[in-house]
Image (cartoon, helix red, strand yellow):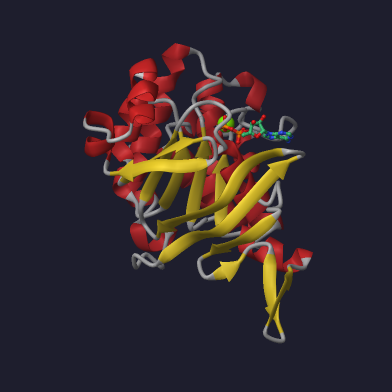
Amino acid sequence: MSSENSLSKEDQNPAVDGSELIRFDSVTKRFGSNVVLDEMDFTVSSGKHVTLIGPSGSGKTTILRLLMTLLKPDDGTIKVAGDYLTHEERGGQLVPASENHVREVRKKIGMIFQQFNLFPNMRVLRNVTEAPVHVLGVPKEQAEERALELLEMVGLSEHVNKYPTQLSGGQQQRVAIARALAMKPQVLLMDEVTSALDPELVAGVLDVLRDIAHTTDITMLCVTHEMNFARDISDDVLMFDAGRVIESGAPEKIFSDPEHERTREFLSAVL
Ligand SMILES: Nc1ncnc2c1ncn2[C@@H]1O[C@H](COP(=O)(O)OP(=O)(O)O)[C@@H](O)[C@H]1O
Ligand SMILES: [Mg+2]
């Protein structure tokens, strides 16, 4: 894979300086009487790869959905690269953000889902160029040139003219990775991106993501049950339970010598 050519550090993420890229301040999210996140504080620094682990139902996906503005917090604020996501400052006051504001801040965030969510009626190449052309206003030719580079990076050069249904699940997920990167997000969110794949296709997708993690400075916030992958790519691992981070640290520490009984239980169940 020629990822260093096609996704240089400067190109992908110009502002890697260790500053806070994501910040949750006292974020609460409820569904009815179910308090999923309870005044949660949480930050991800620019350029870091942070992995969320923890039992099903602990609120991991909720965090990513809040960042994607697919959900709104009931309380608290979220900032992305210094800008409020669901609020804006007007006349010294914090008010709910306009749709325009949300759309602008959202451009900094890319996401890869468990179910690839490709556009079924578009060929692979157009799946990758559609948003850069129509959302960012990138000229079509330029968007195609970059899409071809990204598709080469994810190993799909031979498939650019196919439709998603003509590809395996692993190939479709690699299109989704290229599509997310084509928007040049500052942070890439990933939610169990290999869970829907046949077992023999998992390694190929994880290899691509490992390569991106190791050869670019893109910030990653990742939810995964693939503990070896998490160990390989993460700067920080956050163990989540019942809407709280109960333990966090370097992967060597969390996976080899966890402090918390709950973390030990969880890891012995999944490892
Ligand atoms: N749209 C929703 N409506 C009601 N409850 C939800 C919704 N989404 C998530 N939940 C609940 O929020 C909790 C956390 O879910 P989630 O963030 O998906 O957990 P995880 O990703 O860690 O498995 C669960 O109890 C789940 O049932
Ligand atoms: Mg989930």
Q: Is residue 20 left or right of residue 34?
A: left
- Kindly identify the residue that appears in the image at 36 percent across and 30 percent down: 263
Vertical placement of residue 197 versus 36, above or below: above
Query: Which quadrant is the N terminus positioned in?
Result: top left
Residue 102: image location, x then y, percent? 70, 63
Task: Determine the image quadrant of residue 211.
Answer: top left
Residue 233: image location, x then y, percent? 31, 39
- Kindly identify the residue that appears in the image at 72 percent across and 30 percent down: 120
Task: Determine the image quadrant of residue 59.
Answer: top right
Task: Determine the image quadrant of residue 204.
Answer: top left
- Kindly identify the residue that appears in the image at 50 percent across and 13 percent down: 198
Vertical placement of residue 166 versus 205, above or below: above
Q: Is residue 2 left or right of residue 197?
A: left
Query: Which quadrant is the C terminus positioned in?
Result: top left
Point out the quarter of the image occupied by ligand 1. top right
**Front in this rendered view, residue 12 or 56:** 56
Residue 227: image location, x then y, percent? 35, 27
Residue 237, can we see it? no
Q: Is residue 191 left or right of residue 2?
A: right
Vertical placement of residue 177 versus 268, above or below: below
**Front in this rendered view, residue 32 or 125:** 32
Residue 178, can we see it? yes
- Kindly identify the residue that appears in the image at 72 percent across and 86 percent down: 91
Residue 270: image location, x then y, percent? 39, 18
Vertical placement of residue 29 versus 10, above or below: above
**Front in this rendered view, residue 82 or 200:** 82
Query: Which residue occupies the extreme bottom position in the image?
Result: 91
Number of callouts: 0
